[in-house]
Image (cartoon, grey):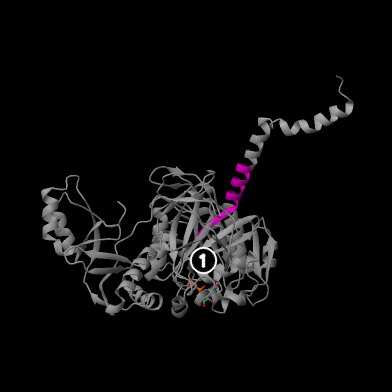
Amino acid sequence: PKLSINSLFFLFSIYKYFVPLPPIYKSANQQINTMSLKQEIQKRRTFGIISHPDAGKTTLTEKLLLFGGAIQEAGAVKSNKIKKGATSDFMEIERQRGISVATSVLAFNYKEHKINILDTPGHKDFAEDTFRTLTAVDSVIVVIDVAKGVEEQTGKLVEVCRMRNIPMIVFINKLDREGKDAFDLLDEVEQKLGLKVTPLSFPIGIGYDFKGIYNIWEKNINLFSGDSRKNIEETIAFNDINSPELERIISERSAANLRSDLELVYEVYPKFDREAYLNGEQQPVFFGSALNNFGVRELLDCFVEIAPSPRPKASEERIVNPDEPSFTGFVFKIHANMDPNHRDRLAFVKIVSGTFERNKPYLHTRLGKKLKFSSPNAFFAEKKEVVDISYAGDIVGLHDTGNFKIGDTLTEGEMLHFKGIPSFSPEHFRYINNADPLKSKQLEKGIDQLMDEGVAQLFKLDFNGRKVIGTVGALQYEVIQYRLEHEYGAKCSYENFPIYKACWVEAPENPKDPEYLDFLRVKQKFLARDKQNQLVFLADSAFSIEMVKQKYPNLKLHFTSEY
Ligand code: GDP
């Protein structure tokens, strides 16, 4: 039979539905997917701002959010909001205390980039919280007050970043005030913080004489207009610092000073080297005034260009790369019920690789069980909202009814355990007692949950079962007491327990090792179990640790829980 031309057309038109796509199309599609995953990850900048309290971290955060259009006006946040309340803090108690207890996430878009700021409490009593948050950032900005220089808390936090080779940018703030000489300050930063700096901007005058900033990175001059030192700025491209134009723009004296300052900068400090910055071997420095919004855009523009997108992370099993298609992530923070009507908690998960999708089952590797999340929260500025998909580098907040502990890993099925959220020895130790015998169950539950959140560490004495709470700062005892009462309806009291440090004891290969058994017998009253049931020696003095080391030379003592 002859085929009509019409039927040929017809056959041709349906042909494509029966023939599978040539393989080239398929792989092109897949390529597009991995491409877009890669692009999404490349866009992301997840970082933390660290500083000593009052250096201006909150003010800087607010100004960054303004640039991202995430908030509308400075006043809105400045009237106590980030500082004493809503934006970065969730709980009543935090509002009351006016301390940024919480570590929350503020995200915004800027120039094709998705920026996630992980807020870190500056108060020293919450240092452990900050240490944990630093496991979830890909870089940090260190804020230093020009008048106060390097302060205690800055030192501790920078040390943690240095140990982990986290890329750091330094922002020297409050240039509108009288402060230290810029070179002295750079010296101080190098010496006290052990950094290798290179200025990417330099102040033109300081305090009363502060006229503006020479931007070494962009080669331009930013000037305050008039004497107000408020907001209004003029940016003048300025490639050649020796041009006579400079005298016209700033005064003759300032021009001469700037030229000699820059000469010294170029002579003394190495050129900016991005590799070195990314490896944590060099730290660029910017100067400015967060309050007056001066030097902040320059910082942000450079930051999005040079700061790393999400970095690979080590698990016990292997290194995980962010652009692997399968989702992996870990819990770095747990926040108790922000809504008093709901008894749930929010577990903050940093996505290490792939995408996190709503309603997809994920493996909780510690419990070995699959969990689904119907309303994962993503963060945008001061709001959180339910999202369908988030990418490596992002933080998702998962509602949790008690499955999570800090450090837990989630995957699509692979047995992985991310490393690096150790507990350190607390500084303070107190017995905790039940002050309302009718509420012992509530007390038990409250203590349990607060410890999972990482508010403090619980030790149970081996010989009498008494509970000891260890904290970094004395303030935590009040926080715990307050929260036990207001969230769990339980009352507690404390009793002093003069302990110097907790040391984790590594069990010997031979559990019958005579030296080990002797230690266990002699120190019986000072032995306890932590929440993971690891053996801990609560030493009452530095001297007794020394004595133990001398008497039991083969015994292995550790000052962190991960060894
Ligand atoms: P944080 O504790 O590090 O978050 O510090 P804040 O951002 O709350 O700032 C502490 C105080 O310093 C506040 O009173 C701010 O208004 C003030 N401050 C912040 N940045 C500047 C600045 O650039 N210049 C001046 N003069 N004050 C500033």
| Residue lying at 61% horizontally and 77% vertically, measured from the top left | 75
The prevailing secondary structure element of the residues shown in magenta is helix
Residue 216 makes an appearance in the image: no
Residue farthest front in this picture: 1
**Residue 200's spot in the image, x, y percent?**
56, 57
Write down the residue under mark 1: 172
Q: Would residue 47 be found to the left or right of residue 366 on screen?
A: right
The span picked out in magenta is 33-47
In the rendered image, residue 226 lying in the magenta stretch gets the answer no
Please name whichever residue, 15 or 172, is drawn nearer the observer in this view of the structure: 15
How many numbered marks appear?
1
> Residue placed at 66% from the left, 36% from the top?
28
Q: Is residue 37 magenta?
A: yes
From this view, report whether residue 465 is shown above or below residue 340.
above
In x, y percent, where is residue 540?
Answer: 19, 66
Residue 482, given in percent of the width and then of the height, sits at: 37, 78
Residue 30 in view in this figure = yes
**Residue found 35% across the figure and 71% down from its top:** 446
